[in-house]
Amino acid sequence: MNDAYIATGKALEYVDNLSQLRPDGTLKSYAETRVGPSGAYEKLVIATQWRQIDWPFVSTFDRYGPVFTSCRLLGHEPVNGYDTDHYSATWHSFPFSPSYDMWVSVANGRVIKVVRDYSKTTWEFSFPIAVDLFDYSHKADAEPKGSTQ
């Protein structure tokens, strides 16, 4: 899990779509992050403009210890056209520590999907279960139209 977390953070171009997992199993878009050579940008669904953000910093240690604890390989399954290994863990990013499911591409070792369940801990968002879907096929090298500094 640590290797996949670092490999994703080192990817030069990717799009991360963050959504709320609704009780009926559907996803409700919340935000999109684009990382490319021109920088990193984020847009909440309710926003009218993209904003430039700091390049996502990725480390396998939080201020109080490892980012991932209680790691387990759960199986092998296809996700969004990728052959993946499915892992579970507890993710630590002070003050948050949700249960964390991660699907990692067998081919390139990058994160394809993440499900963070905050229902038994402090919520990071206005909803308890967040889903990140990563896309490495988009060219995120151009600054999004309507971005602000």
Image (tube, helix red, strand yellow):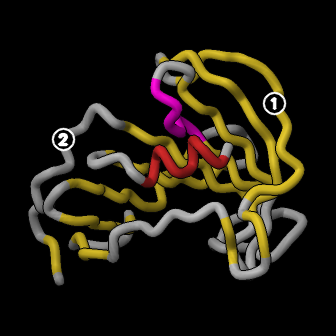
| 78 left or right of 135 in image | right
Q: Is residue 23 left or right of residue 11?
A: right
> Residue at the spot x=74%, y=74% of the render?
96
Apparent side of residue 60 relative to residue 122 in the rendered image (left or right): left
> Is disc 2 placed on a helix, strand or loop?
loop
Q: Quadrant of the C terminus?
A: bottom left
Q: Which mark is residue 139?
A: 2
Residue 61 location in percent, x, y?
68, 68
Residue 114 lies in quadrant: top right
x then y, percent, for residue 29: 47, 53
Q: Is residue 110 above or below residue 106?
A: below
Residue 97 in the image, given as x and y percentages of width and height: 79, 68
Is 104 above or below relative to 66? above
Amino acid type at circle 2 is Lys
Q: Which residue is mark 1?
A: 73
At x 14% / y 62%, what residue is drawn? 38
The vertical placement of 93 against 35, above or below, is below
Which span of residues is magenta-colored?
108-113
Q: CA distance from mark 1 to mark 2?
A: 31 Å
Q: Name which residue type carries label 1.
A: Leu
Instruction: Please identify the quarter of the rendering in which residue 95 is found.
Output: bottom right
